[in-house]
Amino acid sequence: MSVPVIRMEKVTKLYTMGGSTVAALRNVSFEIGRGEFVSIMGPSGSGKSTCMNMIGCLDRPSSGTVEIDGTATTAMDEKALALLRNKTVGFVFQQYHLLPSMTVLENVMLPLRYQGIERSERARRAQLALDAVGLANRMHHHPYELSGGQKQRVAIARATVTEPHIILADEPTGALDSETGKAVLALFRTINKNGTTIVIVTHDPRIGASTNRCITILDGTIQADRMQEPEEFHA
């Protein structure tokens, strides 16, 4: 394996619910190397989304260590975590999370604004990102004018516009029909071939089988972690 871009070491995450303590993750350890294409698979409530939140610095472990790009995140303050997320991690969600009042171009430009990049350069980079996902001709439309597959491609363009080392995708095909989902997975594979680490969180075994490595999680613990020959996504 290459030098890890993601490292989780003995991570446990506890939540207090109704006076009782629930363990979402239990002593989870794994490494993901730069340029890997990985799925984290498990049913609802398995802990896979909590795992993604740890990798994306959206939540902190109760115990254990999380390292992103060689940086230990556990003791970082919120400002430092936000900066790390903006520069290092791109997020793609099932429900797209596009801002309806903004055009497609403006949505993709937004992460660059947080980096303090001048507007004309933001627009240039956003246009390139949209061209890469085949939506340069829709840049002045609003999200409500797009299909579900087009919205997801805009979300992918937004995730890649900052040239992050890691893309985290949470059920990215869950709201799409099978053919559109297949096209989105093919787009992820193209991005991955350019060197970006892709981690897809999913409950769908078809997606789990379509990646080069599949980590299976159940009841907050890793049940399997296997390298595999990726299969084509089928309906």
Image: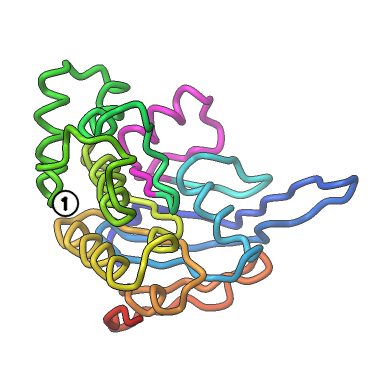
- Which residue sits at x=28%, y=22%? 115
Q: Secondary structure at mark 1?
A: loop
In the picture, measured across the screen, residue 220 lies left or right of residue 142, that is right
- Which residue sits at x=44%, y=25%? 80
Is 17 part of what is drawn in magenta?
A: no
Please, is residue 174 above or below residue 169 in the view? below
Q: Which residue is mark 1?
A: 133
Q: What stretch of residues is rendered in magenta? A: 68-92
Image x and y of residue 172, in percent: 39, 58
Furthest residue to the right? 19
- Which residue sits at x=16%, y=36%? 139
Which quadrant of the rendered structure holds the C terminus?
Answer: bottom left
Image x and y of residue 203, in percent: 51, 70
Q: Quadrant of residue 31?
A: bottom left
Is 91 part of what is drawn in magenta?
A: yes
Identity of the amino acid at label 1? Val
Please, is residue 19 above or below residue 8 in the view? above
Total marks in image: 1
Image x and y of residue 66, in percent: 51, 47
Image x and y of residue 22, in percent: 78, 55
Please, is residue 153 above or below residue 84 in the view? below
Please, is residue 133 above or below residue 173 in the view? above
